[in-house]
């Protein structure tokens, strides 16, 4: 049975996308750690929209998880015709002061798991000469941002990888899309421990969307088979501005703003 696999589907943007895709009659396979939430959401969506919704509880901090998910899909005879690599987390504050294990986990989730899942499921899509892979980026992928340095770099990795794979996969009929939300009100800030002075300094004044607004823009870009899309009019405008200014200037200015807001010297 054909299915769309969504990572990070137990909440936030992933859950909102799952709801929109179920409404469009797509069969789904939902992945995240919280089995209870996945079970409830699967039941809700399959009953409401009369689609097949599977779920696989997995911790993507574990480098073995992508292979286990791939094998589980084969075992259940689920053909992943669309893969949405949405699961991700952030981190903020001084890089040197962050817990190294947290940073490593973030890289494994935002990049390692995304690379492994993409590599595994892409093989079958290339053979079928059909399929879609979407990688969730962020507005932050468009410029270096001090005090969110590694999170930003992890999303720049996703952007470059997606844009390159788009070209590699195009001759096989497999579509790769990069999708970048801006600030979105989800559990993201709490998960990244950014609900504090540091978080406020990093994001103050940024336009915020709801997960549902982001999902609506996602669905439009997804069905239009865009190669890349940014969610939110203000965010698209910001990206245009960012391309006009050298990265070094943006980085220096972001660092100054952050220090001013947190009353740091330097
Ligand atoms: N919110 C924003 O402001 C914002 C802005 C730009 C980009 N984004 C990107 O959008 C994507 C979704 O973010 P969100 O705002 O929806 O965040 P969220 O509300 O924190 O949701 C994150 C999702 O990822 C799952 N997840 C987290 N750690 C996991 C792990 N170790 N293994 C498996 N699943 C895991 C969570 O489920 P479990 O806890 O059940 O595992 C949850 O379903 C991320 O890639 C994020 O970087 C978000």
Image: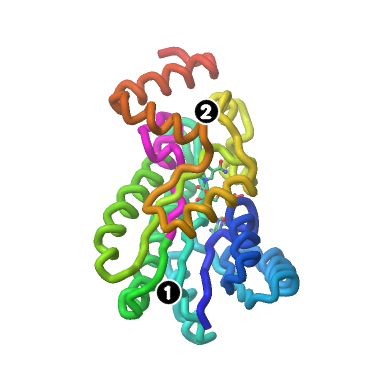
Which residue is found at the position 51% from the left and 35% from the top? 233
- Is residue 160 in the magenta section? no
Residue carrying label 2:
202
| Category of crowding for the residue at label 1, using alpha-carbon neighbours closer than 10 angstroms: few (below 14), some (14–19), many (at least 20) | some
Which residue is found at the position 52% from the left and 70% from the top? 4
Horizontal side of residue 196 vs 73, given as left or right: right
| Category of crowding for the residue at label 2, using alpha-carbon neighbours closer than 10 angstroms: few (below 14), some (14–19), many (at least 20) | many
Residue carrying label 1:
67
Q: Residue 204, image x and y in percent?
A: 57, 25
Disc 2 element: helix
Q: Nearer the viewer, residue 29 or 100?
A: 29
Horizontal side of residue 63 vs 244, given as left or right: right
Q: Residue 259, image x and y in percent?
A: 47, 18
Q: Is mark 2 within 8 Å of ligand 1?
A: no
Span colored in magenta: 134-151
Residue 55, quarter of picture:
bottom right
Which residue is found at the position 52% from the left and 52% from the top? 218
């Amino acid at each position: 049975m054909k299915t769309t696999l969504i990572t990070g589907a137990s909440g936030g943007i992933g859950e909102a996308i799952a709801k929109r895709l179920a409404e469009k009659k797509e069969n789904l396979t939902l992945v995240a750690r919280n089995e209870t939430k996945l079970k409830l959401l699967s039941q809700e969506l399959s009953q409401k929209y009369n689609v097949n919704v599977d779920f696989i509880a997995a911790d993507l901090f574990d480098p073995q998880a992508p292979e286990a998910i791939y094998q589980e899909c084969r075992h259940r005879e689920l053909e992943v015709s669309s893969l949405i690599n949405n699961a991700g987390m952030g981190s903020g504050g001084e890089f040197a002061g962050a817990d190294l294990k947290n940073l490593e986990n973030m890289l494994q989730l935002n990049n390692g798991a995304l690379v492994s899942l993409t590599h595994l499921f892409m093989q079958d899509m290339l053979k079928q000469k059909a399929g879609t892979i979407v990688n969730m980026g962020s507005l932050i992928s468009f410029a270096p941002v001090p005090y969110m340095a590694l999170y930003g770099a992890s999303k720049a990795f996703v952007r470059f990888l997606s844009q390159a794979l788009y070209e590699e996969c195009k001759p096989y009929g497999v579509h790769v899309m990069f999708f970048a939300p801006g600030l979105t009100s989800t559990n993201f800030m709490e998960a990244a421990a950014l609900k504090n002075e540091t978080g406020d300094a990093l994001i103050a004044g940024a336009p915020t969307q709801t997960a549902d607004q982001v999902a609506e823009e996602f669905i439009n870009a997804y069905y239009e088979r865009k190669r890349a899309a940014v969610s939110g009019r203000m965010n698209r405008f910001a990206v245009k501005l960012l391309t006009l200014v050298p990265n070094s200037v943006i980085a220096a200015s972001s660092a100054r703003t952050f220090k001013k807001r947190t009353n740091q010297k330097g």
